Amino acid sequence: MTDPHEAVHVILDDTAMAAAGRGNLLASRLIHRAHAEPGWYLYATACALVEADRARPGTGEHIVSLPGITVLDLDLIAALSVARHDTWAVAHTLHAAQPTPERPAGAVVATAVPGAWTAHPVRVLDLTP
C-alpha cells in the first residue's frame, strides 16, 4: 500500500474538467497517471463537475466515465463550507483541497485558469498549454 504522505492528490477544478473534455494534453496525462500509476489520486468535486458541465455540456458524463477519477460528494461539512462562498465550484474544490486523514498534506488544484486561485491558500497545477 502507498504511504498517504508520499501520495500525490490532485483535484480537478471546473476549468480543468472542461479542458480535459477539449483534449488538453496536460489534463490527459494527469488522468492517465491517476489511472496507471500507484500513489496518484485524482478527484472531481460534485459542485465543480456541475459547473464544468454547464460550461461545456457533456463534460460531467465524460469525467465520471474515466477510470482513476473519484467524485467527491457534497457532504454536510462541504455544504457548510460552500454556503460561505459565492461560487459553489470554487468553494467545494477549496474545501476538498484541505488536509484530511486520507490526504494529510491536502491536495493540489489542477486548473486551466491558475489566476483564479491566487486569492486562495492552495497549491496549483497549471494546465494551460
Image (cartoon, rainbow, N blue to C red):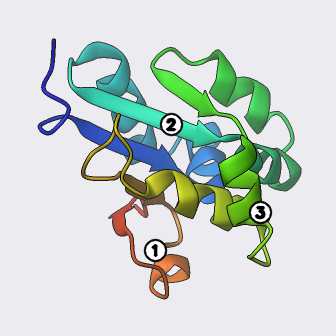
**Which quadrant of the figure has residue 8?**
top left
Q: Which numbered disc, 1 or 2, marks the residue that appears first in the sequence?
A: 2
Q: Amino acid at mark 3?
A: Trp
Q: Amino acid at mark 1?
A: Pro
- The location of residue 14, given as percent across then percent down, is 66, 54
The residue at 67%/52% (across/down) is: 78
The residue at 62%/30% (across/down) is: 71
Do labels 1 and 2 touch, CB within 8 Å?
A: no
Q: Is residue 110 visible?
A: yes
Location of residue 81 with respect to 4 vertically, above or below: below
Under circle 2, the secondary element is strand
Residue carrying label 1:
114
Horizontal arrangement in the rendering, residue 22 relative to residue 129 (left or right): right
Residue carrying label 3:
88
**Which quadrant of the figure has residue 17?**
top right
Q: Which numbered disc, 3 or 2, marks the residue that appears first in the sequence?
A: 2
